[in-house]
Amino acid sequence: MVVSTSRLSSAITARPVIATAVGAIGISTSGLFVALSSASPGTASVFRCVFALPLLVPLAVAEWRGLGPPSLAQHGWAALAGVLFAADALLWTQAIYEVGVGLSAVLVNTQVVMVPLLARLIDRESLSARFVALLPVVALGTVLAGGVLEPDVVGTAPVAGTVHSVLAALCYSVFLFLLRRGGPDRPLVQSYMTVMVSAAVAAFVGGAFWGGVTLAPGWDATGWLMLTAVNGQVLGWLLVALGSPSLRVEISSALLLLTPVAALVLAAIFLAQQPTPVQIIGSAVILVCAYLITTSGART
């Protein structure tokens, strides 16, 4: 029996706070599971997308029966977005090994300043005074959280990890920008499947030039990457995508900050990755700025 997306959507939107919170925490486990897999950036990025597809198929079929397929243009934007998602995944996975699970998740939150900047550059949308004022504060928080100024910090290469995290945030920002081009009325799951297929192919090509892609990563790595796909790519994404639009922006923004916060906690508990006091301050600066930007409306 094909899963009913309308019933699923109704169940999630009936309790949007719980759904969004659980989804955000589910996404936060991705970094931990990728780190435990010890897979190369290419291998992890390919398989987290491939393993998500069988779980998305029944939902996509049900959506297609109810809403019809996305337009060719929507498929095109989703496919292009998938390439950027792959770049984000490759860079972020590399950053996990260089700066740690929790801090890489925090640093990727710098995307909140990049999306409005892209809108300003491409669509000529205006920026609020608060957004402009917070830009240098986010930059300072990034330097502090990345441990660039400290000798003994989590990770093997904090400077490289910070750079890779920020580049991942940039790729993710363009990814979100391209999805926005696809339109808010696109069939959600089918478009997301297009993203995953495109991302898997792009990650395979990119990963081949960056540490290689192992097609048989072993049972342990496979298990962790399957958990990454289930928790982050499917359940976490679905809960956040369906739950957050039903909430006021200040509530959804606060709940989405559970992802980096939970990632920091998980990294400390399971991987003994303890940020320094300066890194904690930098992380707090980034997260507070992210909340202020998303709740105030960065563009006016």
Image (spheres, rainbow, N blue to C red):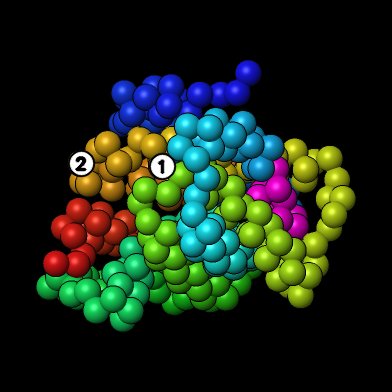
Looking at the image, is 237 positioned above or below residue 19? below
Q: Quadrant of the N terminus?
A: top right
Viewed as shown, does residue 111 lie left or right of 29?
Answer: left
| Kind of residue at badge 2 | Arg
User: Does residue 212 appear in the picture of this structure?
Assistant: yes
Residue at the (62%, 31%) spot, across then down: 58
Viewed as shown, does residue 251 lie left or right of 173?
Answer: left
Which residues are drawn in magenta?
39-51
Residue placed under numbered mark 2 in the picture: 248
Residue at the (35%, 51%) spot, across then down: 184
Q: Which of the pair 210/181 is nearer the observer?
A: 181
* Alpha-carbon span between mark 2 and mark 1: 14 Å
Disc 1 packing (10 Å; few <14; some 14–19; many ≥20): some
Report x, y in % for residue 284: 32, 57
Report x, y in % for residue 164: 55, 72
Disc 2 packing (10 Å; few <14; some 14–19; many ≥20): few
Residue at the (29%, 59%) spot, across then down: 290
User: Of helix, strand and loop, which mostly describes the magenta segment?
Assistant: helix
Q: Secondary structure at mark 1?
A: helix
| Kind of residue at badge 1 | Ala
Viewed as shown, does residue 109 lie left or right of 2?
Answer: left
Residue placed under numbered mark 1 in the picture: 241
Looking at the image, is 39 positioned above or below residue 254? below
Is 47 magenta? The answer is yes
- Which of the 4 image quadrants contains residue 256? top left
Viewed as shown, does residue 89 lie left or right of 144?
Answer: right
